[in-house]
């Protein structure tokens, strides 16, 4: 019974994440176009977004700003939130960093 409750809560959190993530990407794109560097843009977006996106992006920004490489911080995000959109976002940012 407890397991079903946990799975239901997890599913609800992922559904909320999927609903709010496009707005976060839009805010991130606007911040980058305004001239902010990627770490600052991630901080801005983590403050503006709805939960649970804000919490995950804030944790990713903290990891990236406090010594973990951005590639690893994005990989950690993809592991914490195993959604296709997050994997694509992480891959796109990692590819952009390499080129």
Image (cartoon, rainbow, N blue to C red):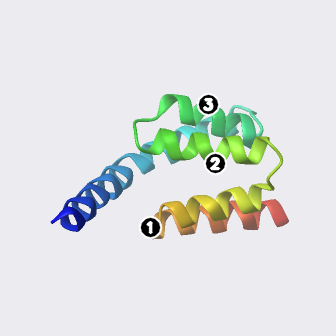
Quadrant of residue 32 within the rendered picture: top right
**Tag nearer the camera, 3 or 2:** 2
- 8 up-or-down from 19: above or below: below
Q: Which mark is residue 5?
A: none
Query: Alpha-carbon distance for marks 1 and 3?
Result: 22 Å
Dot placed on the residue nearer the N-terminal end, 2 or 1: 2
> The C terminus appears in which quarter of the rendering?
bottom right
Query: Alpha-carbon distance for marks 3 and 2?
Result: 12 Å
Q: Which residue is mark 2?
A: 60
Query: Alpha-carbon distance for marks 2 and 1?
Result: 15 Å
Dot placed on the residue nearer the N-terminal end, 3 or 2: 3
Residue 99 shows in this picture: no
Q: Secondary structure at mark 2?
A: helix
- 35 up-or-down from 24: above or below: above
Residue at the outermost left position: 1
Q: Secondary structure at mark 3?
A: helix
Quadrant of residue 78 within the rendered picture: bottom right
Crowding near pointer 2: few (<14 within 10 Å), some, many (20+)?
many
Crowding near pointer 1: few (<14 within 10 Å), some, many (20+)?
some
Q: Which mark is residue 83?
A: 1
**Viewer-proximal residue, 92 or 47?**
47
Please tell me which residue is depicted at 38% across the width and 46% down the height of the picture.
20
- Residue 40 in picture, x, y percent from top left: 72, 34
Q: Which residue is mark 3?
A: 44
């Amino acid at each position: 019974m407890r397991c079903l409750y946990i799975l239901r809560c997890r599913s609800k959190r992922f559904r909320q994440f999927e609903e709010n993530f496009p707005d976060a990407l839009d805010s991130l794109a606007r911040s980058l176009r305004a001239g902010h560097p990627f770490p600052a843009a991630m901080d801005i977006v983590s403050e503006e977004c709805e939960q649970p996106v804000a919490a995950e992006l804030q944790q990713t920004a903290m990891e990236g700003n406090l010594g973990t490489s951005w590639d690893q911080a994005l990989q950690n995000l993809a592991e914490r939130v195993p959604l296709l959109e997050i994997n694509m976002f992480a891959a796109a940012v990692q590819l952009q960093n390499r080129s």
